[in-house]
Image (cartoon, helix red, strand yellow):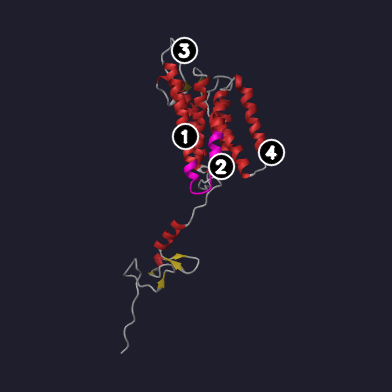
Amino acid sequence: MAADSVITTCFRHPRVESHVRCTRCDRYICPSCMREAAVGHQCVECVKEGARTIRRARTAFGGRIGTVPLVTYVLVGLNVLAYLAELARPSAEDRFAMLGTVPAGYLPEGVAHGEWYRMLTGAFLHLTPGEGTFGLTHVLFNMLALWNIGRVVEAQLGRVRYLALYLLSALGGSVLVLLLAPTAFTVGASGAIFGLGAAYWVMGRRLGHDMRAVNQYMAGLLLWMVVSAWATSWQAHLGGLLTGAVVALAYAYAPRDGRRTLVQAGVCVALLALLLALTWVKVSSLTS
């Protein structure tokens, strides 16, 4: 009498008969556990393990490659929402604009009086219609520039590095305003955008791009900073430009090995500490 044949079952579903083995772990798998592989089929667990061991593609500066400029979309959205809030409640601009201090005899307000948040919130506000020289064009031009250059820089840096560059550039612009024009009332994303422009130039040089278009863009930014100095805060523009250049140089020339992320993050943290230290020194001199 012939012996009964051995019935094999799926290792994940013991009650399901199976005759197919995973090409990676050699265990039996049922149709619901099969995943197409280059050769044969693999089980769910082996597919997950293989995905963890695959090295993700990176940009030339170490960031993760993304197909959607999500951070740029969010930044534009935040600026637009802040602008709508200004239109709905004009007092919001007075409350959150960049202001170092006020002349003697006025109610104390500004960064020198504990309102340090103004150094970032002011970079998300813009002039409202009928206010100042530019009015509505202020937010329109800035958002157009952010949309055009931000998507390019984000694609080259990755989301985390790009966001750090943007916020540090905005902060750098506010710090130079505090140092050189502490009583100036400033709003706008221009400082951060000038930082993105500096990064665009540095990265173009590092990657060996044709610099004619890049140089034309930077020449336009610098010309605008000079021409508009009578009506805009050139201090915020210059501060953002210099800060963005420092961050971009760290991104572009950090060693391309396991130390790259550490060096890039270290420079950003050191720069943040320097900006905060300069702010503290200036605040101390204004309140002494």
Helix, strand or loop under label 1: helix
Q: Earlier in the sequence, mark 1 or mark 4?
A: 4
Residue at image coords 33%, 79%: 6
Q: Is residue 150 left or right of residue 17?
A: right
Kindly identify which residue carries mark 4: 212
Q: Earlier in the sequence, mark 2 or mark 1?
A: 2
Kindly identify which residue carries mark 1: 270
Q: Earlier in the sequence, mark 1 or mark 3?
A: 3
Q: Is residue 12 magenta?
A: no
Magenta extent: 244-263
The number of discs equals 4
Question: Is the residue marked by circle 2 packed among few (<14), some (14-19), or many (20+) residues within 10 Å?
Answer: some
Question: Residues at badges 2 and 1 in contact (C-beta under 8 Å)?
Answer: no
Helix, strand or loop under label 2: helix
Judged by its main secondary structure, the magenta piece is helix
User: How far across and down, in percent of the image, does residue 163 sit?
Assistant: 49, 38
Q: Separation of disc 3 and disc 2 at Cα?
A: 44 Å
